[in-house]
């Protein structure tokens, strides 16, 4: 059975997909939220009537100024909560993301302000994604899945869309693939499933991810 999502979830989904992909279509929103296409179409009609979204000539979905403001408010609170849950309470990444989902709608502007102050005005969530309103733009870069053998790179961030996969997010956390971590790519190996295994080191630990998993990790060459 499809999950039920409020309108704020659709606004934040559009915001997230736009930041990663540029153009947002109803099909990508459906895939991201794991709901049917007709459900997305109905909700987009309601959001359009409320002047929170608008459609382009190619049926792409765009946030209006009001819609973007509402989406950024929710995303900002979510990423602040992730930072607090992870840094102050020591909660593991994936669980922090799920707990933030539960709490983000209950925070008042006063609590948001106090939380921002307590955390020292962070600019990113623990996964490296920019906190709206912090003055930092979303970091971009190449993906670990595309790195050549012998490359030495730093983790910049985990793509927001990967946060919906708890098992994957937990694996990244277990391997120490946190923003700022240094990765030494050892080798790439073709595997029968039409994928590639990427063998690498993080510190003294040897790890492996398939290219389809590693594509969610944004990296930068050492020194950038």
Image (cartoon, rainbow, N blue to C red):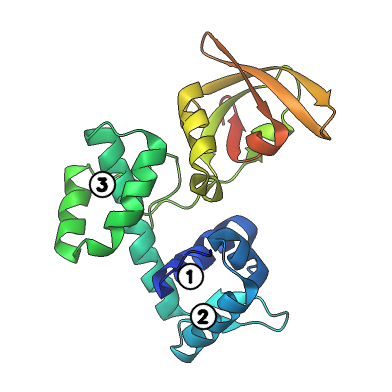
Q: Which residue is mark 2?
A: 43
Of the pair 119 and 108, the residue shown nearer to us: 108
> For the residues marked 3 and 2, what is the alpha-carbon distance in whole angstroms?
34 Å
**Is any part of residue 61 visible from this angle?**
yes
**Is any part of residue 134 visible from this angle?**
no
Q: Which label's residue is closer to the chain start, 3 or 2?
A: 2
* Residue at image mark 1: 10
The residues bearing labels 1 and 3 have C-alpha atoms spaced at a distance of 27 Å
Q: Position of residue 70 (x, y in %)?
A: 37, 72
Task: Identify the image quadrant of residue 113.
Answer: bottom left
Q: Nearer the viewer, residue 70 or 165?
A: 165
Q: Quick check: 209 left or right of 180? A: right
Closer to the chain start, of discs 1 and 3, is 1
Q: Secondary structure at mark 1?
A: helix
Q: Residues within 10 Å of mark 3 (few under 14, many from 20)?
A: some
Q: Residue furthest front?
A: 1
Q: Is residue 107 above or below residue 93?
A: below
Q: Quadrant of residue 212?
A: top right
Image position, residue 155 (x, y; %): 53, 31
Residue 55 in the figure: left or right of residue 182 = right
Q: Are marks 2 and 1 in contact (CB under 8 Å)?
A: yes
For mark 3, what is the residue?
A: 121
Q: Secondary structure at mark 3?
A: loop
Residue 45 image point, x, y percent: 54, 86
Instruction: Specify the label residue 193 is tagged with.
Output: none
Above or below, 73 against 120 in this view is below
Find residue 41 and report its image quarter: bottom right
> Callout 2: helix, strand or loop?
helix
What residue appears at the point 74 percent right and 25 percent down from the top-left corner? 197
Structural distance between the alpha carbons of marks 2 and 1: 8 Å
Instruction: Tell me if 23 is positioned left or right of 138 in this view.
Output: right
Eye-nearest disc, 1 or 3: 1
């Amino acid at each position: 059975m499809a999950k039920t999502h409020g309108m704020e979830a659709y606004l934040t989904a559009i915001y997230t997909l736009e930041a990663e992909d540029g153009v947002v279509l109803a099909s990508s929103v459906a895939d991201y939220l794991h709901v049917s296409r007709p459900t997305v179409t109905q909700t987009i009609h309601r959001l359009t009537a409320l002047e929170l979204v608008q459609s382009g000539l190619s049926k792409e979905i765009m946030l209006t100024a009001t819609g973007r403001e509402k989406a950024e408010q929710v995303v900002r609170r979510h990423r602040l909560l992730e930072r607090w849950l992870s840094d102050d309470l020591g909660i593991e990444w994936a669980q922090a993301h799920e707990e933030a989902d539960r709490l983000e709608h209950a925070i008042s502007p006063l609590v948001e302000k106090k939380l921002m102050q307590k955390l020292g005005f962070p600019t990113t969530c623990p996964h490296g994604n920019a906190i709206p309103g912090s003055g930092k733009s979303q970091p971009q870069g190449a993906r670990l899945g595309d790195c050549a053998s012998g490359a030495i790179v730093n983790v910049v961030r985990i793509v927001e869309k990967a946060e919906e996969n708890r098992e994957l997010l937990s694996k990244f956390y277990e391997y120490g693939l946190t923003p700022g971590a240094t990765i030494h790519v050892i080798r790439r190996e073709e595997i029968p499933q039409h994928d590639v295994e990427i063998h690498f080191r993080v510190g003294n630990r040897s790890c492996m991810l398939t290219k389809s998993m590693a594509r969610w990790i944004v990296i930068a060459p050492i020194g950038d």
